[in-house]
């Protein structure tokens, strides 16, 4: 089959590889009808994610048709149409039972690697380095889905691929980011980053009862989408002082919750942002947490800072003092996909949201190498790339 | 940051050196596991893990000793010969098989199983596993103790071959395999090669 493979920083190739096979009793094989490039794939593309190996198949946002199931998989049948969550979870360990699905104990065969770095390991992930299991990803014609009796969600034929594909990651990720803000009626939520996750965080904040959402980015087309689709007030950080504006817009109090939908490769115009760039370029730091610093500084006393953006290592100049002084709550982590997918499918079916609004580019798998570059450089007003295997 | 694997390897090395020096003086009492394994001698591994399974299920799985090679990678087979006696085989150096007979000398249902090798074995070994209900009975914690000494005159290579260069990591992965088997019903793997440390 055809698959998108990693060969080092900024080196992505489409190659033929053997088709995946059923390896475990609860597995399924899915013939992929639609897949996408995620902002977090760009961290891999940029060489920021450790334990990637040459030849690894990328991609963790995918859906398709079940073509084969393992002998203990009683939930899926060949021919069913499913969306696959990017986190792999067994459904039976302490964490899965507590709805902390992305922290599953039993799905990462390389848990020892993550344990060395983080103390304990989270769940396995599709196409996202060997530290997270080394599972082949979904930017391919077929994928093997482990624990497919608890992961994939069946979707009705009345909904298009475009409408349901993003149940695989970015919609639940944006939604959990908003859910983590414990939004109360009347709240103001500020969102850093108007990429796909930021767009879904904006919409989700309103779905969960926020009165106002303020969106921060530097790309006009992304701010425009946040305003037109998301109904957010927007701030371009190249043009205004974000903290001053947020203070003014909230009567000097600050937003009730701040969402960092940027993650480890933040850009900024302030001194600390340039300091981060220099340090990471010199390999003296792993992450550039400028957006997170600003979110912590801007948040009102007693507020919540929610972090769906991915961080990978050690943060420099992290303002824990400000977070402490203001009694902030910090919430973060990979999305507990299995918890959110059913309720979000219901919201799509009820017409409360149509996730296809983020798609700007539809291409075939063969165009993946160019599209990684286009997406990373935000060329051609690129916000979200959907790919079809053929 | 110190590499845990290197520390484990150094520790194991030190243990084996100690064994090498003391083998001769110990020969006359090596048939007695209590004496042979007392104190700091031998390879001594301890680890614990929690499972979301009822204590009785975990106990009975472990008590059926034939199950042990399914997750303890150093074992080739265990066969129960009488209610308390069993024959064990492990992977020794260079494809050699190391064999011994063992007896369960202490058993408390749903609480404890303890075993030791019998006189005349290739190897002097003892082990125990404790079963505890934790988190208000929701989870079961098992705590495993394993001790191994090489046969006299065969130096440390036998025990080293059993557990590799990082014994604590080996037992960690063994217990993780047990947990996956009992909780998830299968062992997670990313590809057909089923890599395991």
Image (tube, grey):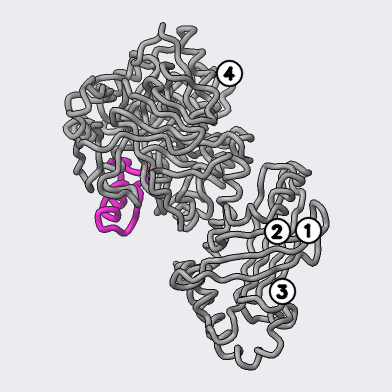
Asked which secondary structure carries label 2, the reply is strand
Q: Are marks 2 and 3 on the same chain?
A: yes
Query: What residue is rendered at 52% in x and 28% in y?
Result: A73
Q: Chain of mark 4?
A: A
Q: Are marks 1 and 3 on the same chain?
A: yes
Q: Residues within 10 Å of mark 3 (few under 14, many from 20)?
A: many
Residue under label 4, please give it.
A185
Q: Chain of mark 1?
A: B
Q: Which residues are magenta?
A: A264-289
Q: Are marks 1 and 4 in contact (CB under 8 Å)?
A: no
Q: Nearer the viewer, residue B139 or A351?
A: B139
Compared to residue A182, the image places residue B20 above or below, namely below
Number of the label disc, if any, that sits on residue B83? 1
Residue under label 2, please give it.
B80
Quarter of the figure that contains the N terminus of chain A? top left
Query: What residue is rendered at 53% in x and 38% in y?
Result: A331
Number of the label disc, if any, that sits on residue B23? none
């Amino acid at each position: 089959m055809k698959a998108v493979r990693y060969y080092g920083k900024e080196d992505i190739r489409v190659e033929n590889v053997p088709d995946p096979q059923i390896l475990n009793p609860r597995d399924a094989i899915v013939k992929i009808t639609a897949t996408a490039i995620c902002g977090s794939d760009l961290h891999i593309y940029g060489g920021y994610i450790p334990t990637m190996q040459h030849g690894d198949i990328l991609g963790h946002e995918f859906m398709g048709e079940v073509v084969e199931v393992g002998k203990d998989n009683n939930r899926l049948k060949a021919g069913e149409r499913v969306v696959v969550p990017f986190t792999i979870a067994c459904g039976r360990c302490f964490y899965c039972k507590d709805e902390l699905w992305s922290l599953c104990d039993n799905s990462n065969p390389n848990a020892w690697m993550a344990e060395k770095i983080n103390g304990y390991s989270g769940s396995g992930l599709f196409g996202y380095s060997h530290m997270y299991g080394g599972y082949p990803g979904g930017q391919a014609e077929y994928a093997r889905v482990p624990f497919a009796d608890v992961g994939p969600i069946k979707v009705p034929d009345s909904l298009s691929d475009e409408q349901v594909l993003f149940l695989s990651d970015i919609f639940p990720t944006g939604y959990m980011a908003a859910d983590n803000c414990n939004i109360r009626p009347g709240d103001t939520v500020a969102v850093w980053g108007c990429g796909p996750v930021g767009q879904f965080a904006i919409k989700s904040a309103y779905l969960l009862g926020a009165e106002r959402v303020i969106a921060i980015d530097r790309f006009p087309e992304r701010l425009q989408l946040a305003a037109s689709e998301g109904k957010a007030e927007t701030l371009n950080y190249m043009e205004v002082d974000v903290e001053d504006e947020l203070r003014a817009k909230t009567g000097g109090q600050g937003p009730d919750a701040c969402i960092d939908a940027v993650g480890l490769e933040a850009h900024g115009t302030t001194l600390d942002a340039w300091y981060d760039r220099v340090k990471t370029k010199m390999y003296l730091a792993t992450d550039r947490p400028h957006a997170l610093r600003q979110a912590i500084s801007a948040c009102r006393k007693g507020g919540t800072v929610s972090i769906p953006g991915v961080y990978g290592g050690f943060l420099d100049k992290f303002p824990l003092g400000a977070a402490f002084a203001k009694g902030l709550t910090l919430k973060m982590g990979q999305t507990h996909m299995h918890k959110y997918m059913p309720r979000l499918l219901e919201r799509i079916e009820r017409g409360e949201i149509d996730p296809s609004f983020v798609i700007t580019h539809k291409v075939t798998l063969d165009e993946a190498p160019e599209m990684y570059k286009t997406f990373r450089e935000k060329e051609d007003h690129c916000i979200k790339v959907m790919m079809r295997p053929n | 940051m110190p590499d845990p694997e290197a520390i484990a390897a150094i520790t194991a090395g030190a243990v084996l050196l100690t064994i090498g020096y003391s083998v001769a003086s110990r020969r006359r009492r090596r048939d007695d596991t209590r004496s042979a394994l007392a104190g700091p001698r031998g390879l001594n591994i301890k680890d614990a893990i929690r499972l979301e399974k009822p204590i009785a299920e975990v106990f009975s799985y472990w008590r059926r000793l034939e199950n042990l090679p399914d997750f303890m990678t150093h074992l080739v087979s265990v066969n129960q010969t009488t209610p308390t006696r069993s024959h064990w085989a492990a992977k020794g150096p260079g494809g050699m098989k190391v064999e011994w007979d063992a007896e369960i000398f202490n058993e408390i249902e749903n609480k404890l199983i303890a075993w030791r090798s019998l006189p005349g074995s290739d190897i002097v070994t003892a082990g125990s596993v404790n079963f505890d209900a934790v988190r208000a009975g929701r989870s079961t914690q098992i705590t495993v103790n394993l001790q191994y000494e090489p046969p006299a005159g065969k130096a440390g290579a036998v025990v080293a071959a059993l557990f590799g260069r990082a014994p604590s990591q080996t037992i960690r992965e063994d217990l993780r395999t047990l947990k996956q088997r009992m909780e998830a019903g299968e062992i997670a793997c990313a590809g057909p090669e089923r890599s395991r440390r």
